[in-house]
Image (spheres, rainbow, N blue to C red):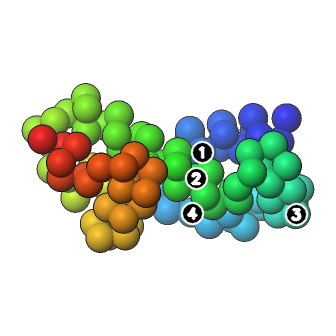
Amino acid sequence: EIILTINKYFSDHYSERFSIPLMSSNTGISLVRIETAFDTYKGKTAMQALLEYRLNRLCDLMAENPSGEIHSQIQWCGLEEFANTNDAFIAHFGIDIVEFHR
């Protein structure tokens, strides 16, 4: 149930910049319970799960709107600067953002 609640929060708020402690406060689920649930059921931290969610949304957005500006799409997905996002994108998908965007 915790994972479902947090995934819903990710879905509703992924384009916003927020911290996991803020999400904990907004959902009324303790940070310890969130992190324990993600570690137990997903094998990752909540922050890692959020990053993956945002990267997947970025991938979807670029596929839906290939003529869109990459930096704007990155920001729309709540991600930070290009270099860090590109490193995470490569680690997650095995391809550079610019190559994928072509």
| Residue 49 can be seen in this image | yes
Q: Nearer the viewer, residue 91 or 59?
A: 91
Name the N-terminal-most of marks 3 and 2: 3
Residue 23 in the image, given as x and y percentages of width and height: 69, 58
Name the residue beneath numbered marker 2: 50
From mark 1 to mark 3, how far is it between C-alphas?
Answer: 18 Å
Residue at (37%, 70%) from the top-left corner?
84
Q: Nearer the viewer, residue 72 or 87?
A: 87
From mark 3 to mark 4, how far is it between C-alphas?
Answer: 17 Å
Name the residue beneath numbered marker 1: 10
Which element carries disc 2, helix, strand or loop? helix
Name the N-terminal-most of marks 2 and 4: 4
Which quadrant is home to the N terminus? top right
From mark 4 to mark 1, how far is it between C-alphas?
Answer: 10 Å
Q: Residue flagged by tag 2: what amino acid is it? A: Leu
Name the N-terminal-most of marks 1 and 3: 1
15 vs 33, left or right, is left
Q: Residue flagged by tag 3: what amino acid is it? A: Val
Name the residue beneath numbered marker 3: 32
Q: Residue flagged by tag 4: what amino acid is it? A: Phe
Name the residue beneath numbered marker 4: 18
56 vs 96, left or right, is right
| Labels 1 and 2 touching (C-beta < 8 A) | yes
- The picture quadrant where one finds residue 2 is top right
Residue 33 in the image, given as x and y percentages of width and height: 89, 56
Residue at (30%, 49%) from the top-left corner?
95
